[in-house]
């Protein structure tokens, strides 16, 4: 109720990411987009997502780390946020299959990660 009232009074609706679900011990749970959607529907206002896949987050992260695109890779388990964030930012992408995305689900996307690993344990220095 409070969020709806504040947004209707002019507050900006900002979300961390557009993930609808996230992994949980026994399956999935609602994530940010699923929790913000009722506020969007009630107010008619769309949320602005500042986290992945927004390239703004990637540029800020590179600046904070003092690194360049050429020496950086983004590692993640979601094609629709982690991997697209890297692609839209020009950063190499590594998809780990230990989370949300699988070899089957990545076929539905027009873009593909640069590298695919079974899990982060497959990385070597």
Image (spheres, rainbow, N blue to C red):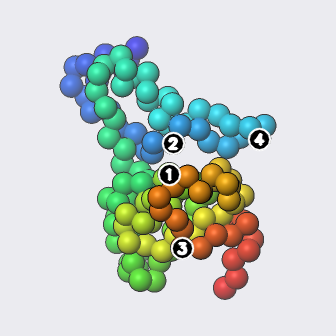
**Separation of disc 4 and disc 2 at Cα?**
17 Å
Q: Nearer the viewer, residue 118 or 58?
A: 118
Q: Quadrant of the N terminus?
A: top left
Helix, strand or loop at mark 3: loop
Q: Position of residue 50 (x, y in %)?
A: 36, 48
Rounded to the nearest angstrom, the CA distance separating label 1 from label 3 is: 15 Å
Identify which residue, 104 or 79, lies in the foreground. Answer: 104
Which label is found at residue 19? Answer: 2
Q: Which residue is mark 4?
A: 25
Among the two numbered marks 4 and 2 on one chain, the one whose residue lies closer to the N terminus: 2
Residue 4, compared with residue 70, is above or below; it is above
Q: Which secondary structure, mark 2?
A: loop
- Name the N-terminal-most of marks 2 and 3: 2
User: Decide: marks 1, 2 in contact (CB < 8 A)?
Assistant: yes
Residue at image point 45% right, 45% down: 17
Q: Position of residue 12 (x, y in %)?
A: 27, 33
* Observer able to see residue 47: yes
Marks 3/4 in contact by CB < 8 Å: the verdict is no
Q: Which of pointers 1 and 4 lies earlier in the amino acid sequence?
A: 4
Q: Quadrant of the C terminus?
A: bottom right
Q: Hey, which residue is sitting farthest right in the picture? A: 26
Left or right of 86 on screen, residue 97: right
- On the image, numbered disc 3 is attached to which residue? 114
Q: The residue tagged with tag 1: helix, strand or loop?
A: helix
Instruction: Pinpoint residue 42: horizontal percent, then vertical percent.
Output: 36, 16
Q: Which mark is residue 80?
A: 1
Give how far apart the Cα atoms at labels 1 and 2 are: 8 Å
């Amino acid at each position: 109720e409070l969020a709806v009232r504040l947004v209707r009074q002019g507050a900006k609706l900002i979300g961390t990411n557009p993930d609808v679900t996230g992994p949980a011990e026994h399956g999935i749970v609602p994530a940010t987009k699923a929790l913000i959607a009722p506020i969007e529907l009630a107010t008619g206002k769309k949320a602005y997502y500042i986290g992945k896949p927004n390239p703004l987050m990637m540029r800020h992260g590179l600046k904070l780390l003092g690194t360049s695109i050429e020496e950086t890779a983004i590692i993640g388990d979601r094609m629709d946020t982690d991997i697209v964030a890297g692609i839209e930012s020009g950063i190499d992408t590594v998809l780990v299959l230990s989370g949300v995305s699988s070899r089957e689900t990545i076929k539905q996307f027009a873009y593909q990660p640069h590298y695919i690993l079974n899990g982060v344990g497959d990385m070597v220095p």
